[in-house]
Image: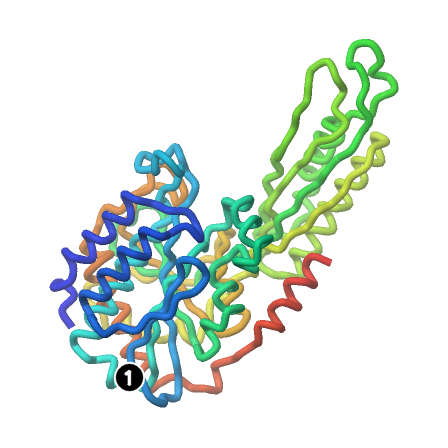
Amino acid sequence: MDFSRSYEAVKKIADQIYANPELGYKETNTKELVLDYLTQVNPDIEVQHFSTTGFRTTLGSGEKPLHIAFIAELDAVYAPSHFRAGPENGAAHNCGHYTQVAIALALYQQLFESGRYEAFDYKLSFIFVPAEEYLDLAYREELRREGTITHYGGKPEAVKLGVFDDIDISMCVHAIGGEFEQRTVEVNSDLAGFLYKKYHFKGKASHAGLDPFSSVNAYNISTLFNTAVGLSRQQIDEKEMVRMNPIVMDSDMSTNVVPNHITVGTDLRAQSLTYMKEAADRLDHAAEGSSRALMGDVDIETQMGYLPFKQDRYLSTFAEAAFEKNDQIPKLMSSNPISAAGDIGDLSYMMPCIQIGYSGFTGTIHGDDFMDIDPVFIYQIFPQFLADVLEEMNGNIDRENVYSRSYEDYVNVISSMTE
């Protein structure tokens, strides 16, 4: 397969998506652009649509012992200060998802045109999912209330709709932030899971000048809570990579009225569900204790974000084998867990998943300075590497290493975290 043949076309698509970012469950133009390209490559393509803007197409037919999904994410981040942010929606592709989509198109095109997929002992589906980024929550809650979606994340939503029912293994890729001296790929980078916590502190209002003595200051309670969170960090297990970032969510405070309510929200990230629960208990105790100390009250709201992502080490061996035979990529990174999260964690609870990282960028992921600087690596060399990984998997995957859990199992785990 010669990925140089598709380089210019897929780079053009990537540039178009980058210049026209869309938020999750709103990726209408992105979807149309991608489908137009796929239809040009394969006029007889069959597409399964799901969840507003998601879609799936499959290479190969008939009975095969395995079915692998290659996943690309369609959405952008809300980042209005990014230099290429959309002027109307404030979205920006400083997550790198636009390159994922182009990489998937390059891989699909070369496999289809070469016919190489026909020799695989597995079927291969390309699944373009919406809404990986956990944001624009008011809009997603509106979709949920009207019954359009059940989950904020596009992957668990796709699972709920049956898109992954016949999939055994999933494979994704993701940009690595920062610059590297050498072209680099990465495996076994585990991600945190997170809870979304809201603390609604309640006090008693009064005139701040005339009668502050009969008040209960909700803002002061939130300040004490933030202090308690800071002091508790010493007691948190470092290997769990816990992250908390309490912020004031809403307030209509006036300087002449002692505030009687304030909401503090925070993500709570950890590498395991067990420790996430323990850290959540610490946060809840800090909120309750701060409220009691200043004679107020608190209502606690807990929402599950995404599950931790444990990369499947068995599947990673195929990527490592492809790297050993590769003479164009000089560096492989492995086993560097981070506290970022993604809904690939939810999918990995139900089936084996890997997410292979790739360099070629400058700036910080989700930062105002993020952009690609090595398109030849991203759209030509790296897709060839992925094709090599698929070749390594062909005929070599041991079904004993493939697990499966149901959507119902997943829902029970999610529910247990918010009880």
Q: Position of residue 173 (x, y in %)?
A: 36, 61
Residue at point 13%, 69% (across, down): 2
Q: Is residue 405 left or right of residue 1?
A: right
Q: Is residue 86 left or right of residue 210?
A: left
Residue type at mark 1: give it: Phe
Quadrant occupied by the C terminus: bottom right
Quadrant occupied by the N terminus: bottom left
Q: Is residue 302 left or right of residue 22?
A: right
SS state under label 1: loop
Q: Position of residue 404 (x, y in %)?
A: 53, 79
Image coloring type: rainbow
Image mark count: 1
Q: Position of residue 348 (x, y in %)?
A: 50, 68
Residue at point 62%, 52% (across, down): 195
Q: Position of residue 308 (x, y in %)?
A: 55, 61
Q: Which residue is mark 1?
A: 120
Q: Is residue 32 left or right of residue 166?
A: left
The image shows residue 139, relative to residue 188, as above or below, that is above
Splitting the image into 4 quarters, where does residue 120 fall? bottom left
